[in-house]
Amino acid sequence: MISGIWYTEDHKDGVTLSLKVKETLVSKRTPFQKLDIYETEKYGTLLTLDDLVMTTTKDEFVYHELITHVPLFAHKQPERVLIIGGGDGGTAREVVKHPTVTHVDMVEIDQDVVEMSKQYMPFLSEDLTNPKVHLFFQDGVEFVKKASTAYDVIIIDSTDPIGPGEGLFNSEFYTNCLKLLSDDGILVAQAESVFNCPDWVWQTFAKLREVFPVVKAYLGTIPTYPGGLWSFAFCCKQPEVAQFFDEARYEKLQLDLRYYNQAIHRACFALPNFVQKLCQGR
Ligand code: AAT
C-alpha cells in the first residue's frame, strides 16, 4: 500500500514494514498479479508483487547469494540448473557465476516481471541474456510435470503460497521436482518467515519431508522480508550429499560475493531451537 510518501506492507499481527518512497516507477496489473516498482530513499529500487516485497537494491544480495551458492557449492559438479520463478533475474545472475554450470532453465510465470526488471533493475537482470540461460514463460507446476531431463540443482525462487505461487508449495509439485533431480542432486526452496509465518514454514517443511529423503533448513537475515529472519529448505536424495561442501572450489573461484563465504555456508545451517521445531517437525 502506498500512503503519502511511504510504501507500507502489512505483515499482519499488528506489524508493518514501511519504506520511504521517492518515486513510483511502475504500477500495473499483469495477467497474474499486481506489479509495482518504487525508488525508495534508503533501499534503492523496490519490486513488489501483490503489494509484498520481492526484492530491493540494498538487501537483494543476501537472498540471491544464499538461495544459489549454498546448493551450488554443496554439489560436486553442478552443470544443469533449473530455476522456478526468479523473474527479476537475481538468482540466474548468481548461478552463472559458477563455471561448471553449462545450462540453466528458468521458468517464470509472469513475463512482465522479467521485462520490468530488465528496464528498471538491470543490476538483477543483467545475466538473463547469458546464452546459458534459457527462459520459459510458463507455470512452474506445468513445466515440472512435463520435463524429463535431469537437473543437478533445482532452485525454487517463488512468491508466497498464495496467488500464482500457491502450486509451488504442494506435494505433487515436489514429487515432480524429485523425479527431475539427478541422484546426487539438490533442491533448494525459499521457505518463508520463521517469525511471521511459522504455519507456512511448518507446512512447507512437512510436505518436503513427505517427498525428499533428506530435508535440512538454513537461515539468512533479509531486512525487508517479514520478520527479517528467512528460512530456506535444502533437500536431496542421499545423506552424504547434505554433508558435502566444496570449500576448495569456493577458494579457487574467488567470486566477488557480499554475503556468502565458507563460514556462512556452515553457519547458516545452525538453527535456533524454535526453528528446529518448525522445520524438523520436533
Ligand atoms: N528473486 C526474489 C524475488 C522473488 S520473485 C518470485 C517469482 O516467482 C515472481 O517473479 C513470480 O512471478 C514467480 N512465480 C510465482 N508463481 C509462479 C509459478 N507458478 N511458476 C513460475 N513462477 C512463478 C521471491 C520473493 C520471495 C518471497 C518473499 N516474501
Image: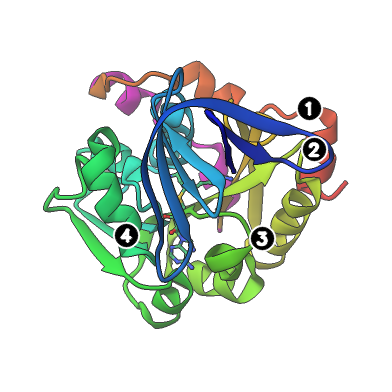
Residue 26 in view, yes or no: yes
Q: Residues within 10 Å of mark 2 (few under 14, many from 20)?
A: some
Q: Are marks 3 and 4 in contact (CB under 8 Å)?
A: no
Q: Residue 39 colored magenta? A: no
Q: Under tag 4, what secondary structure? A: helix
Which kind of residue does numbered mark 1 sit on?
A: Pro
Which kind of residue does numbered mark 3 sit on?
A: Leu
Which residues are the magenta region? 237-252
Q: Position of residue 99 (x, y in %)?
A: 20, 38
Q: Position of residue 179 (x, y in %)?
A: 48, 73
Q: What mark, if any, has residue 208 been given in the picture?
A: 3
Which kind of residue does numbered mark 4 sit on?
A: Asp
- Look at mark 4 in the image and give the residue it sits on: 112
Q: Residue 247 colored magenta? A: yes
Q: What mark, if any, has residue 272 been given in the picture?
A: 1
State the CA–CA distance, disc 2 to disc 3.
Answer: 15 Å
- Look at mark 2 in the image and give the residue it sits on: 276
- In the image, taking residue 179 as reference, residue 174 lies left or right, namely right
